[in-house]
Image (cartoon, grey):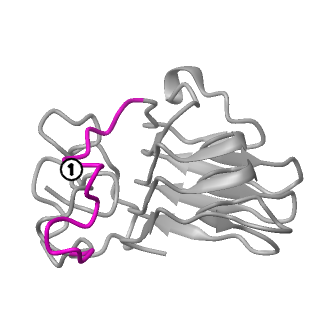
Amino acid sequence: ITNGLFVSNSTTGGSSDGGGMYVSLNSPTLLNVTFHNNSAINQGGAIYHPANGGGTYTNCIFWLNTAGLFPEIRVIGGASVRTFKNSVVRTTGGSAAWILSNSTDAGGNLDADPLFLDTSDPNGADNLFMTADDGLFLGTGSPALHTGTTPAGSLPSTDITGANRVQGAAVDMGAYEK
């Protein structure tokens, strides 16, 4: 998944884990994806990642998701590798003090408010995601601005709105480029 948004999703009923995404029997690759305001009744407000799959998460933002346990990401043990690189992941301590169990910190991770422009109106005044007025653009002074990484051969040329992907010294984290 590239340039993706998972916003205001929730779990109900039987399987109440993984408000934004429930990863099972696969190993997703996510690049420049934003998870915001998703909720799970049990675990993993943004992502629930059981033991039977790996995954790579690069330049992603996991912020203000909620769950009974593990509000952002719940990773269960297993032999598969789940790697996080240059991403904002709330409640993990960032690369300096990485505490997300059963995962690998590949460097550049942050546990700092990404300073979205307007979380109360994530799809902006036009009520359409993927447009220039979206509230999930990064605000001035965001630690996620120009601090992403460029994976070899896989960085898209545009962001989720169609704007050029790199507009500063380096790519931004999340779905939007500023």
Left or right of 172 on screen, residue 61 = right
The residue most toward the front is 13
Is disc 1 placed on a helix, strand or loop? loop
Name the residue: 44% across, 63% down. 7
In the depicted view, which residue is nearer to us: 10 or 72? Answer: 10
Prevailing secondary structure of the magenta residues: loop
> Does the stretch in magenta take in 115?
yes
Name the residue: 61% across, 63% down. 10
Q: Which residues are magenta?
A: 112-130
> Label 1: how many residues lie within 10 Å, few (<14), some (14-19) or many (20+)?
some
**Is 175 placed above or below 110 here?**
below
Disc 1 marks a residue whose amino acid type is Ala
Name the residue: 28% across, 50% down. 120
Q: Quadrant of residue 174?
A: bottom left
The spot of residue 83 in percent (x, y) is 62, 51
Name the residue: 83% across, 66% down. 15
Looking at the figure, which quarter contains the C terminus?
bottom left
**Is 29 placed above or below 81 here?**
below
Q: Quadrant of residue 71?
A: top right
> Does the stretch in magenta take in 85?
no
The spot of residue 153 in percent (x, y) is 37, 73
Q: Which residue is mark 1?
A: 170
Left or right of 112 on screen, residue 48 = right
Left or right of 55 on screen, residue 87 = left
In the depicted view, which residue is nearer to us: 167 or 38? Answer: 38
In the depicted view, which residue is nearer to us: 169 or 177? Answer: 177
The spot of residue 77 in percent (x, y) is 87, 47
